[in-house]
Amino acid sequence: MRQENIQDCSMELLYLSDEDTHFHQDIEILYIVEGETAVKEGETYRLGKDDIAVINSNQPHAYSSARNTIAFRILIPYRTFRKLIREEYFIFCCNSVLYTSRDDRDLRILIETLLLRYLNMEHADLSEIASLLFQIIHKLTADYRMDKDSLKIYLKEHMSEKIDRILNYINHYYYEPLSLTDVAAHFQVSETYLSRYFKKKTGQNFINYLNEVRIENAALELRGTDASITNIAMDSGFSTPSVLNRYFKKKYGITPSEYRKQIEESVKNDAMKIEKVEEVRKSLYDRIEKRIQDSAVKEVTINVRRGYIPWMNPNKIIDIGEASVVCEAAIQEHILFLREVLSIRYIRIWNLFSEKFMITTDFSGENFNFESLDRIFDFFVQNKIPLFLDLGKRNRVIMAGHDNELYSVNMQYNLKTIEEWKNLLEHLMKHLVRRYDKHVLSQWIFEFPWNKEPYYSQDYRYLDAYEAGWRIVKSNLGSSRIAGINPHGGIDEEQFREAVHELSARGIFPEIFTIKIFVDSTHQMMGERTFQSGSDYLYARQFIEKIRGILEEEGQTYQMCISEWSNSLSNRNIVQDSCARGTYIIKFILSIWKTADMIGFWHGSDAVDIFYDSRKLIYGGGGLLTKDGIKKPSFYAFEFLNKLGGHVLKIGNNYIVTRDSTQRIVCLCFNHREYSYYYYMKKENEHFNLSKIFQSEEKERVEFTVEELDDNKEYMIKEEVINSSSGSIQNEWQLLSNQEELGKEEIQYLKNICIPKIYIRHVRSEDRRICFQVEMEPHEMRMIYISEY
């Protein structure tokens, strides 16, 4: 159909043909109506029916489309966004294929509504179309703009050299009367220097490059608009049409008018395609309008007779923290409870060599006192809990944000040499062997992570420290498993590859390879990827897959373990006390469960985060339990995942349906809401307005149909629900006026009521199927059990 232009924005429903690599200043929104196309934009991905992708300004991209692929394309000038955003640089992370964790429903409805009005342009209210365009601009700006921290990383990685910034500046301001003098002044260099530097880096002079950019954009205008040659010349930055003609003919061999005629002839020859678009017009109209009307209801059909994939719950580890905290009775109580209810296999602790334990005053000698450590080890051995021992060194830190330390202190002994490290570890291992049965110790995992803090101070090299640990553990307990490397965020890909290769070459490759994932922090070995801070499950998957790819190059056998992960490094974030963290946990696990053999959550209890500011009942701690042992919604997320059956029948964006060993259908569904831009703008998480930090606060309705059941039989549907009015400690505490000091009775009362609400109903199968609908509040988790009655 004909391209329409409103408020400097253009839109067109078209057959998407193959397009070679090109770029333009406009922000491009591509919505696939039918068919599919492969998009090459750095990496290659495929867009299918109903997918949305935003191509950022001056981003090179190419299309390779299947036959008869129909797309709705919107082009919005960069300068339009810039006037509204009032910032020099901005990047949108909007792609329904690459960013699968996002709920794009609101944006999709806006685009589809605009498409409906476009299809009826002859009867459309142009002011409404303009309004829809600005609503789309607002939606992208509010919910899809890269946050400032990630943008800094992006600019550092992709525009690390001055020439990158200069070219970006030219590409964004080519339409202005730009001169070498203007650019030199902007970057605070002399014209002479800029001229020589530009020629050296690009191989052409400034004015030739500028005119290349202007011609490229003029050609785009000629292809996509009916604007006059004069207007196109002025809009592209040329002083007169004759100047455009001269440069255009030099590049294309024909004048702009001749170029436009060729394009028009091509369109005429494509008349059949236009007729085809008219044929699908009505069906497209009906389909889009129906989706708008029914968008609030998701339909899920489950066939209980079809094949399945096994569900392997990877949640086998809970991180507790400093070894010294295990001496506290409350922590021991929490550990026992978490292990029993959540079927946790390992408890992970660190900082075994704390000064609190008074192990020795001479690490080169023979006199070591492990009595304090024995009390900790005895607790785990007596309760038959295998340990995951992080033998590295780390500071004790209280974080109020991913880059805001409230408190940090080194609790470890400061070893001087590798010989002292070997001596300490050798004495510890011999002590363990003397005190405990080897069969018990063989179930423990000994980890030597690549932390920022060194194991010893003189001539430190991580691989040497790891090898010393590996050989000492193996010589004393050959059957125990070794874990490493768990690289910290400052390690780049080259360092990592070298370390992995050297571990393989030395014959000391770990049986368990550990990594940590906190999605509000970046990792240098994923430097070519940018991501939406705080919620990007794709980034986590790609990080794991990249690590696996590097490891597999060495041909070694290993297990992949995410030994630490959470939604945030912070342990002062009120989101962590809310239902939102519960749905986040489920979303994350279902996004990455196939990529890891074991996962360790950071961390088990708020009681390990107690500080001067933790007088309140809850204070944004990172635990699954409050300091008083009250279950948070995040606890129930793990409990619900643990209750799933072993066979996955169906899995979707906000649900997983399984069957257990008794043939009962067990379904976990959840209404997860992504963060809004407001979340990233705020610095102090404690002062968040929870009603504003999410993109939307809509209910979610899901209609389930279970097929291939016995006919005319009664089934019981039992539901366990956690939401803001059922089982949420954050909301229940609000009903007590957020009273800071509570007595034992009040705390016991909260323990009793912070549990799932239970509903039971009965349905009878008809035509061998049952149907039922659930409506979920924002951030709700709902466990559904379907069994014969």
Image (cartoon, rainbow, N blue to C red):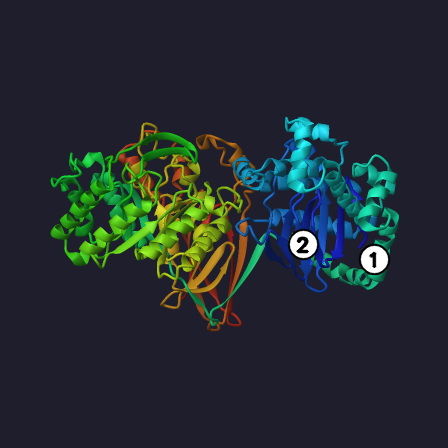
Query: From mark 1 to mark 2, how far is it between C-alphas?
Result: 20 Å
Circle 1 is placed at which residue position? 267
Q: Position of residue 608 (x, y in %)?
A: 29, 38
Q: Position of residue 318 (x, y in %)?
A: 32, 48
Image-quadrant location for residue 375? top left
Circle 2 is placed at which residue position? 62
Q: Is residue 207 visible?
A: yes
Q: Nearer the viewer, residue 147 or 414?
A: 414
Horizontal relation, residue 408 to residue 156: left or right: left
Q: In which quadrant is the N terminus drawn?
A: bottom right
| Disc 1 packing (10 Å; few <14; some 14–19; many ≥20) | few
Dot 1: what SS?
helix
Dot 2: what SS?
strand
Number of on-image labels:
2
The mark lying in front, picked from 1 and 2, is 2
Q: Who's the residue at 79% across and 36% down the image?
A: 237
Type of amino acid at the residue the image marks with label 2: Ala
Instruction: Looking at the image, tell me whether mark 1 or mark 2 is earlier in sequence order.
Output: 2
Image-quadrant location for residue 559? bottom left
| Disc 2 packing (10 Å; few <14; some 14–19; many ≥20) | some
Q: Who's the residue at 88% across and 39% down the image?
A: 242
Q: Nearer the viewer, residue 75 or 719?
A: 75
Q: Is residue 760 visible?
A: no
Is 736 above or below relative to 709? above
Q: Position of residue 633 (x, y in %)?
A: 39, 45
Type of amino acid at the residue the image marks with label 1: Val
Q: Position of residue 355 (x, y in %)?
A: 21, 34
Q: Nearer the viewer, residue 329 or 487?
A: 487
Is 4 above or below relative to 679? below
